[in-house]
Amino acid sequence: MAKIPAKTHGEDYERFGRNLAAMRNKIGLSQYEIAEKLGMLQSTYAGYETGTRKIPLSVIVQLSKFSCSGFISGICTL
């Protein structure tokens, strides 16, 4: 029996999640590693990347604290 994909919260959440995943991949962290740095479960963070979970403003604020001035050079820290 085929698995039914989880319902997302819409196109904006999906796009935000894709951007979030791209940022995470750019800095070379796994979902588990970034979730740990943010103090949450990997499954919670994964939901933000897929758009199946609404991301709270408090998490967006935490993510904004990444020092990504070196995005071009690939140097980002939390």
Image (cartoon, rainbow, N blue to C red):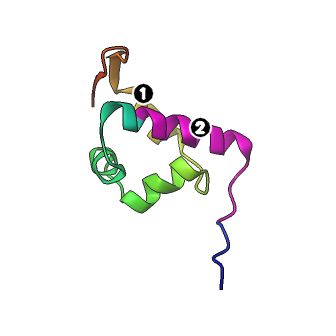
Query: Magenta segment, which residues?
Result: 6-23
**Is residue 19 depicted above or below 55 in this figure?**
above
Task: Left or right? Give the position of 67 relative to 56.
Answer: left
Disc 2: CA contacts within 10 A as few (<14), some (14-19) or many (>=20)? some
Task: Give the image location of residue 14, x and y in percent.
Answer: 64, 45
Disc 1: CA contacts within 10 A as few (<14), some (14-19) or many (>=20)? few
Task: Give the image location of residue 8, x and y in percent.
Answer: 68, 56
Q: Secondary structure at mark 1?
A: helix
Task: Give the image location of residue 1, x and y in percent.
Answer: 65, 86
What amino acid is at disc 1?
Ser
Tag 1 residue = 64
Residue shown at the point (52%, 49%) measured from the top left: 48
- From the image, state whether disc 2 or disc 1 is nearer to you: 2
Task: Give the image location of residue 10, x and y in percent.
Answer: 73, 48
Taking depth in this image into account, of 2 and 44 the one nearest to the observer is 2
**Is residue 23 depicted above or below 30 in this figure?**
above
What amino acid is at disc 2?
Phe
Query: Would you say residue 77 sits in the magenta stretch?
Result: no
The C terminus is located in which quarter? top left
In contact (CB < 8 Å): disc 2 and disc 1: no
Can residue 62 be seen here? The reply is no
Q: Could you tell me how far apart the alpha carbons at marks 2 and 1 are, in whole angstroms?
A: 13 Å
The mark nearer the N terminus, 2 or 1, is: 2
Residue shown at the point (69%, 39%) measured from the top left: 12
Tag 2 residue = 16
In this view, the residue farthest toward the front is: 1
Can residue 36 be seen here? The reply is yes
Residue shown at the point (32%, 48%) measured from the top left: 30
| Corner quadrant of residue 72 | top left
Task: Left or right? Give the position of 22 relative to 68.
Answer: right
